[in-house]
Amino acid sequence: MERNETRETREDQAILQKFLPQFIDHLPGQVAQIEAMLRQRSIEQLAQAVHQIKGTAGMYGFPEVSALAARAEVAARGFKPPADPDVLAREVQPLIELIRQIEGYDVSKEGEHVGA
């Protein structure tokens, strides 16, 4: 039984590695969307976006990104107007900064998604 699990784990990791560049390539668009959602105060959409990042980042081996996304999601889901949106932005900003540090992240691609 262990051999199968090991083989499956290796196969799963190989599949994830195959799609990792695509995941990283999509991150600038996600960051641009998150920043737009903050500006527009689209809180429910923001919560959904960081929830998605939480799951995919964890799956691709970025536990720190996943943890910060979870924290941002909790903050977004708990945000109730007329609360100060800057408080929510301060919870989301560390996530954005960490994502931008991922190897292969291309900040210039954020501009392709302005107004998203």
Image (cartoon, grey):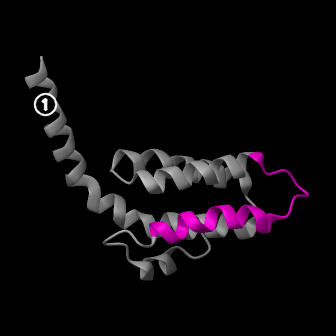
Q: Main secondary structure of the magenta part?
A: helix
Classify residue 83 by image quadrant: bottom right
What segment carries the magenta color? Answer: 78-99
Name the residue: 73% across, 55% down. Answer: 43
Which amino acid type is shown beneath numbered disc 1?
Answer: Thr
Picture quarter with the C terminus: bottom right
Which residue is at the front of the view, 30 or 63? Answer: 63
**Residue 107 within the magenta-colored segment of the rendering:** no
Picture quarter with the N terminus: top left
Name the residue: 72% across, 70% down. Answer: 39
Reply above or below: 23 against 102.
above
Which residue is at the front of the view, 25 or 50? Answer: 50
Label 1 sits on residue: 6
Disc 1 element: helix
Pinpoint residue 7: horizontal percent, then vertical percent: 10, 31
Which residue is at the front of the view, 8 or 37? Answer: 8
Reply above or below: 19 against 4.
below
Name the residue: 79% across, 51% down. Answer: 79
Horizontal placement of 36 versus 96: left or right?
A: right
Residue most extreme to the left: 3
Q: Crowdedness of circle 1 by 10 Å Cα count: few (<14), some, many (20+)?
A: few
Pinpoint residue 102: horizontal percent, then vertical percent: 37, 68
Pinpoint residue 28: horizontal percent, then vertical percent: 46, 70
Classify residue 26 by image quadrant: bottom left
Reply above or below: 72 against 87.
above
